[in-house]
Image (cartoon, coloured by chain):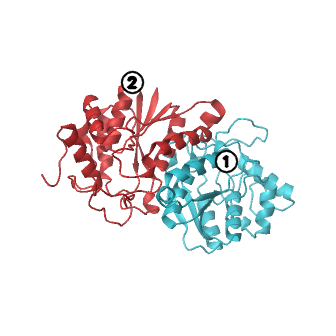
Chain colours: A red, B cyan
Amino acid sequence: MKAVVLLSGGLDSTVCMSVAADAGHELYPVSFLYGQRHNREIECAKKIAAYYGVNKHLIITANMDAIGGSALTANIDVPEGDENRKDIPVTYVPARNLIFLSYALGYAEVLDAGKIYIGVNALDYSGYPDCRPEFIQQFQKLADYTTKAAVQDRKIIRVETPLITLTKAEIVKLGMQNKAPLHLTTSCYRGGDKACGRCDSCLLRLRGFREAGIEDPIEYDFH
Amino acid sequence: MKAVVLLSGGLDSTVCMSVAADAGHELYPVSFLYGQRHNREIECAKKIAAYYGVNKHLIITANMDAIGGSALTANIDVPEGDENRKDIPVTYVPARNLIFLSYALGYAEVLDAGKIYIGVNALDYSGYPDCRPEFIQQFQKLADYTTKAAVQDRKIIRVETPLITLTKAEIVKLGMQNKAPLHLTTSCYRGGDKACGRCDSCLLRLRGFREAGIEDPIEYDFH
């Protein structure tokens, strides 16, 4: 079966890709140039797609920077990480996962793919509303009303979220088990050549590797 | 109140814009360059936005042609119109309204706008699944789970569909009543300098004007 995989080039989406590969699906990764400051993740995504030998890696230009409102797409500083933060942080990109899933749904319909994989995670997540199971469930309901495939031909495109209930440490372990190319991934919001090690995303990643008892194979600025 | 208005440059979205203007909202029109063959509609949208004297007209580049699968975005001919057609036609663009609404939702959140206007129409429509009330209702449910505004701050962004139950003739009459600039609109899928008068979209428009007893102010190729 064909599966569309949302592949950012980060840890979670790469482990998610490894799960889809492990299930024997024909992989159709999709990445987005959405005006993110850390657009070097696209280069990582390309290497990860190549690692899996996919036939096609679709890169969509989707200028969310036109919308702005986020430290990742507008002229707002990426803050230092804070693991005790309660609010949704400024790195939240309005409607990002909704936009990503919407494109993925259209692409899955064109490909006649039965599944969309997305590496959202509700446990060790950053407080983003569009990473929660409730969001995904509602998206699935909506998808069934959206496509010609579903409405006319009764073909359901299923959204798969294999990481949604895992801790970051469990995600790292799952990636190791599936031989996911974790060394090719990037997580840092700041998008420098080396990871900053201090933003929310770096802190979550580092803690995940630490708790998994595995050394993170990527380079950090403080090393 | 601020309102985001999805403005394609077509008849329906322009009448929809006139309804939002009539309600006294501060208008924030959004248009998309999505790889459509009839991208001259963007020039129409710009003139319509100027007619309403808006502060900002956001034009988003969203390359849906990367996805393809439609006569409007891929190398597939636009067919002659057929008012008796039962199937969803090849001019259907997979997930288009979902992608449009997703961007609009993110933009509304950034603007702190309370409403999104979309000129979908379920009666004289072209058989597109994402123009139906069920689709809009499900999108509204999903929206309430998606944004930081809704989840953290309990601010609901409402999707308004003032045309959804109207006939094309009623839409024309409503536009006239609201002094909508119908002469600036374009509907033709083929995107030539003059409307072709033969595609689905032209046929629907022409019938609407005829049934409303009003002369269509735009130029057609057969005139």
- Mark 2 element type: loop
Where residue B143 sits: x, y (%)? 55, 52
Q: Residues within 10 Å of mark 1 (few under 14, many from 20)?
A: many
For the question of whether residue B35 can be seen, the reply is no
Chain at numbered mark 2: A
Query: Image quadrant for the C terminus of chain B?
Result: bottom right
Out of B79 and A55, give the one closest to the viewer: A55
Above or below, A77 relative to A150: below
Query: Image quadrant for the N terminus of chain B?
Result: bottom right
Amino acid, disc 2? Gly
Out of B124 and B143, give the one closest to the viewer: B143
Out of A64 and A159, give the one closest to the viewer: A159
Q: Residue furthest left?
A: A223
Q: Residues within 10 Å of mark 2 (few under 14, many from 20)?
A: few
Where residue B190 sits: x, y (%)? 65, 50
Residue at image x 62%, y 40%?
Answer: A145
Q: Quadrant of residue A15?
A: top left
Where residue A74 sits: x, y (%)? 38, 64
Residue topped by disc 1: B131
For the question of whether residue A220 can be seen, the reply is yes
Relative placement, left or right, of A9 versus B100 is left
Whether labels 1 and 2 belong to a single chain: the reply is no
